[in-house]
Image (cartoon, grey):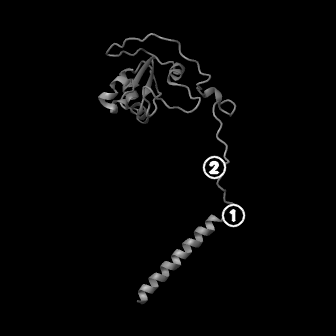
Amino acid sequence: MQRFASITLRWLLGASLAIVLCWLASEAPGQKKKPDRAKAKPPQRGEADAPGYGEFGIYASSAPRPAKAAPVATKLPLELRPGDRIALVGNTLFDRMGMFGHFEAMLQQKYPQHKLTVRNLAWSADAFNLQPRPENFADVEQHLLHEKADVVFVALGFNESFAGPDGLEAFRQ
């Protein structure tokens, strides 16, 4: 019985000490108070506030739009020319390629003298009819124009495939 009382007493002392320490920590002087979310101002959107940073942004409201162009038939196997600028556009499949250099490494290995440039413009969850972006963020066409893409690889349609045969007509449109 004495052993049980000793364990109980130690537990009570430990719990009391923990409560006192938590109380002291919550009332520590000089501790920053959390801002009231109801009174917080929303962050400014649009152009960069810092001088000099605006030139690096590609904004929907100010970036040039590409001219209308006729589609070009792809001939297989695809032959890349020296200096080609390659853009990857699509969903998570291409977005995750940015974590690994396999694709670009194989391209550079196949065409070592071409001095190819590869830009990954993919975003997770992009679909044909939905490409969510932050406010005033330039669209895919504006980014392709900015990067001067000669060759574009597109990976879209995987997410839409989960609609099954019923979603085929919407996918075609």
Quarter occupied by the C terminus: top left
Residue 106 in the figure: left or right of residue 21: left
Residue 93 in the figure: left or right of residue 57: left
Q: Residues within 10 Å of mark 2 (few under 14, many from 20)?
A: few
The part of the image, by quadrant, that contains residue 50 is: top right
Residue 70 screen position, x and y as percent:
44, 10
Position above or below: 67 against 21: above
Position above or below: 116 against 33: above
Say which element carries label 2.
loop
Q: Are marks 1 and 2 in contact (CB under 8 Å)?
A: no
- For this rendering, which residue is in front, 123 or 83? 123
Task: Give, as a three-letter code, the residue at label 2.
Answer: Arg
- For this rendering, which residue is in front, 35 or 82? 35
Task: Give, as a three-letter code, the residue at label 1.
Answer: Pro
Residue 42 in the figure: left or right of residue 139: right
Cα–Cα span, label 1 and label 2: 22 Å
Residue 8 screen position, x and y as percent:
46, 82
| Residue drawn 63% across the image and 31% down it | 46
Residue 38 in the figure: left or right of residue 8: right
How many marks the image carries: the answer is: 2
Q: Mark 1, mark 2: which one is toward the viewer?
A: 2
Provide the residue designation for mark 1.
Answer: 29
Provide the residue designation for mark 2.
Answer: 37
Disc number placed over residue 73 in the picture, else none: none
Q: Residue furthest top?
A: 70
Which of pointers 1 and 2 lies earlier in the amino acid sequence?
Answer: 1
Quarter occupied by the N terminus: bottom left
Say which element carries label 1.
loop
Residue 69 screen position, x and y as percent:
48, 11
The part of the image, by quadrant, that contains residue 159 is: top left
| Residue drawn 37% across the image and 24% down it | 170
Position above or below: 58 against 24: above
